[in-house]
Amino acid sequence: MSTSPDHHSVNNHAKIITIPNILSISRLLFLPLILFFLLQHESILAIITMLVSWSTDALDGFLARRLNQVSDTGKVLDHLVDKIWIAAVLVTLVYLSDLPFYLAVSVIIRDLLILTGSFILMKFRGKLVSSDAVGKLTGLAFALLILYYTLSINNRLAGVYSFISALGKYKYLVNVTVLVLIIISFLNYLVLFLRIMLKLRFPGD
């Protein structure tokens, strides 16, 4: 009987240390390198590293399903790493470029509220809200926003910089669009959160 706790601990440990979870953690390992390239105004190197980092985000979900290693721990870890990654990059871009401070703060506050909601759902309902079409669209908008402002910090890229400058007149529209998506995606999450917490059922469910 004395071996049961150890056996249970080993099983839990094995569930945490999985290939998908290792890939999620790897995004944090890429983060200092991305921030270094940004601070050095090396836009292309920063973007290449970002793309590699983002590829692990897609790969960890695929492998989790393929290897039957989907877990709530993995989902929480994936969300947490994403939020830290985005917050760090946006704060850096506010410092280096003309990314509006209000936009970065809006993203960070949204993500903190969603993270808090996720932990509450895990604790009291034992489930998480998966990203839906609205969440994926908002994530894509964040990625495009980051790429845009990352390119804009390097005026040595003559052709690219001219293209970015030409898009400058649309910058306000882009910023407002992202802000609207932030609000919509949060309200969408809030509705799902309340439905699960309050066990509400709508007609047709």
Image (spheres, grey):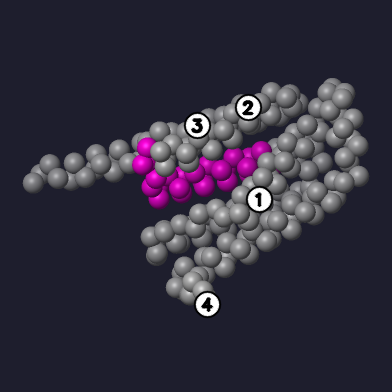
> Looking at this rendering, what residue extends furthest in the left direction?
1
Q: Earlier in the sequence, mark 3 or mark 2?
A: 3
Residue with the mark numbered 2: 49
C-beta proximity under 8 Å, tags 3 and 2: no
Task: Compare marks 1 and 4 and give the one earlier in the sequence.
Answer: 1
Tag 4's secondary structure? loop
Q: Earlier in the sequence, mark 4 or mark 3?
A: 3
- Tags 4 and 3 touching, CB below 8 Å: no
For label 3, count other residues whose C-alpha is less than 10 Å away and answer few (under 14), some (14-19) or many (20+): some
State which region is magenta.
67-91
In this image, 161 relative to 29: left or right?
right
Instruction: State the separation of the CA atoms marked 1 and 3.
Output: 24 Å
Pointer 4 residue? 203
Residue behind mark 3:
26
Q: Which mark is residue 193?
A: none
Residue beneath label 1, please? Answer: 137
Label 4 amino acid?
Answer: Pro
Q: How far apart are the two marked residues, 2 and 4, measured between alpha carbons?
A: 46 Å
The amino acid type, in three-letter code, at marker 3 is Ser
- Alpha carbon of mark 4 to alpha carbon of mark 3: how far? 43 Å
Q: Nearer the viewer, mark 1 or mark 4?
A: 4
Alpha carbons under labels 3 and 2: distance apart:
12 Å
Mark-to-mark CA distance, 1 and 2: 22 Å
Q: Secondary structure at mark 2?
A: helix
Which residue does the image show at 8% across and 46% down from the upper left? Answer: 1
Q: Label 1 is placed on what type of residue? A: Leu
